[in-house]
């Protein structure tokens, strides 16, 4: 176990790097060794810690990393990740082009404005900059509409200091709209055919996020971009069950720091949204929305104490929340509280917590603040 910051408080995140490696290798087995794998490590590797996650992935044989911001990409370059290809998944302003090229980061490009800026800067530096062209087949975000893409691709291919290394598109609804998803695949493949006819050779062609990795084989092409599943998570409860076995890598734990007997009729926490209706044992846990624990879990969320589920009562505060432990006689100060993860035979999943807080698993883990120390279970052997 390795800590990456101060941890005098009893609240911490535990990330099992062995699970991340296991999930990555499961995906590798699923798609075969001829499909390259790019893993998005944006937003602190979905809350898991960027450097530790990237080190694990590189050691497991990842082909490409995907950054969400220029700063993330440059941060990786400055922290020892000098060789591994990094794709900056978003678009950037001209002011970011120079650091991108000098740090050997592959840039996503969806118009001539950025393509020309990349060409110009690369020329000045005497480099050939790699880009991936972003095609919009239905996401409605960055990228050129697929119907208009041929002209752009041909123009970029003529720039002297730019190399088109990849071309890609993205799914907005691979987990819920198969009609749209199939249409996107069809449109992208037909564009690729037209590109082929012009003789422009593009090394990487990619579309697949996690959901498409398991559900849309025709979208794999020769590179996939699984994020969520590498961390052992799925877009909703059970989305991957029976399709691929994954292990959630992240647990969130704390300890009881205070216990009090509360008579009936007393209000608990801000706004008094919970009123005790009988004699209640109330425990206080030192983690709150200031750590990224969603306030919507107030009066709803459950956590594990002594192998039993206990209900969050009253509003979640910034640094603390309260728990009804009346049914757990033996509970005492210092007992472990599992907010995400396993305890004895029970577990609380990120997916379950997302559903309760009316959001998606992505947001649950991204919100987990840097204030919470990360502890790592290091790779075995
Ligand atoms: C984040 C991201 C992914 C990964 O999506 P998951 O659903 O986490 O697998 C893939 N492609 C792009 C462009 C992304 O930004």
Image (spheres, rainbow, N blue to C red):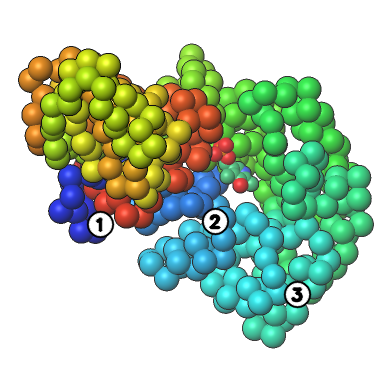
- In the rendered structure, which disc, 2 or 3, sits on the residue that comes first in sequence? 2
The residue at which mark 1 appears reads as 4
Q: Secondary structure at mark 2?
A: strand
Of tags 2 and 1, the one toward the viewer is 1
What crowding class fits label 3: few (fewer than 14 Cα within 10 Å), some (14-19), or many (20 or more)? some
Residue 355 image position (x, y, % from top left): 49, 25
Distance, label 2 to label 1, CA atoms, is: 21 Å
Q: Is residue 19 visible?
A: no
Instruction: Say which element carries label 3.
Output: helix
Q: Percent position (x, y) of residue 6?
A: 20, 58
Task: Using the rendered view, name the quadrant where residue 125 is placed.
Answer: bottom right
Residue receiving disc 3? 117
Q: Nearer the viewer, residue 290 or 254?
A: 290
Do the residues under discs 2 and 1 have CB atoms within 8 angstroms? no
What's the residue at 78%, 22% (across, down)?
179
Number of residue marks: 3
The quadrant the C terminus occupies is top left
Q: Residue furthest bottom?
A: 124
Judging depth in this view, the residue of 202 and 342 nearest the camera is: 342
Label 1, label 3: how far apart the Cα atoms are? 38 Å
């Amino acid at each position: 176990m390795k800590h990456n910051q101060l941890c005098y408080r009893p609240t911490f995140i535990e990330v099992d790097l062995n699970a991340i490696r296991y999930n990555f290798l499961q995906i590798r087995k699923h798609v075969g060794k001829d499909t390259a794998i790019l893993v998005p490590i944006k937003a602190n590797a979905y809350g898991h810690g960027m450097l530790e996650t990237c080190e694990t992935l590189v050691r497991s044989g990842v082909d490409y990393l995907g950054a969400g911001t220029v700063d993330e990409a440059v941060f990786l370059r400055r922290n020892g990740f000098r060789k591994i290809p990094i794709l900056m998944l978003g678009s950037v302003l001209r002011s970011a082009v120079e650091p991108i090229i000098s740090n050997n980061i592959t840039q996503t490009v969806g118009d001539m404005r950025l393509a020309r800026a990349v060409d110009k800067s690369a020329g000045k530096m005497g480099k050939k900059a790699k880009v991936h062209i972003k095609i919009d087949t239905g996401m409605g975000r960055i990228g050129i509409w697929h119907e208009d893409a041929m002209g752009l691709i041909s123009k970029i291919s003529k720039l002297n200091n730019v190399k088109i290394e990849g071309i890609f598109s993205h799914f907005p609804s691979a987990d819920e709209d198969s009609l749209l998803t199939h249409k996107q695949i069809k449109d992208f493949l037909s564009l690729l055919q037209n590109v082929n006819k012009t003789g422009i050779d593009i090394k990487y062609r990619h579309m697949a996020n996690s959901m498409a990795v398991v559900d849309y084989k025709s979208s794999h092409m020769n590179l996939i971009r699984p994020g969520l599943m590498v961390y052992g998570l799925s877009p909703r409860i059970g989305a991957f069950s029976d399709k691929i076995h994954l292990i959630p890598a992240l647990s969130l734990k704390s300890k009881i720091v205070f216990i009090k007997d509360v008579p009936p009729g007393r209000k608990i926490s801000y706004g008094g949204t919970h009123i005790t209706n009988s004699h209640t044992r109330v425990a206080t846990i030192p983690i709150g929305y200031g750590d990224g624990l969603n306030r919507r879990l107030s009066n709803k969320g459950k956590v594990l104490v002594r192998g039993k589920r206990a209900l969050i009562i009253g509003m979640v505060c910034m640094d603390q929340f309260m728990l009804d432990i009346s049914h757990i006689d033996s509970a005492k100060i210092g007992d472990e509280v599992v907010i995400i993860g396993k305890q004895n035979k029970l577990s609380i999943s990120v997916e379950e917590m997302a559903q309760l807080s009316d959001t998606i698993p992505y947001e649950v883990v991204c919100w987990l603040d840097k204030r919470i120390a990360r502890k790592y279970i290091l790779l075995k052997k």
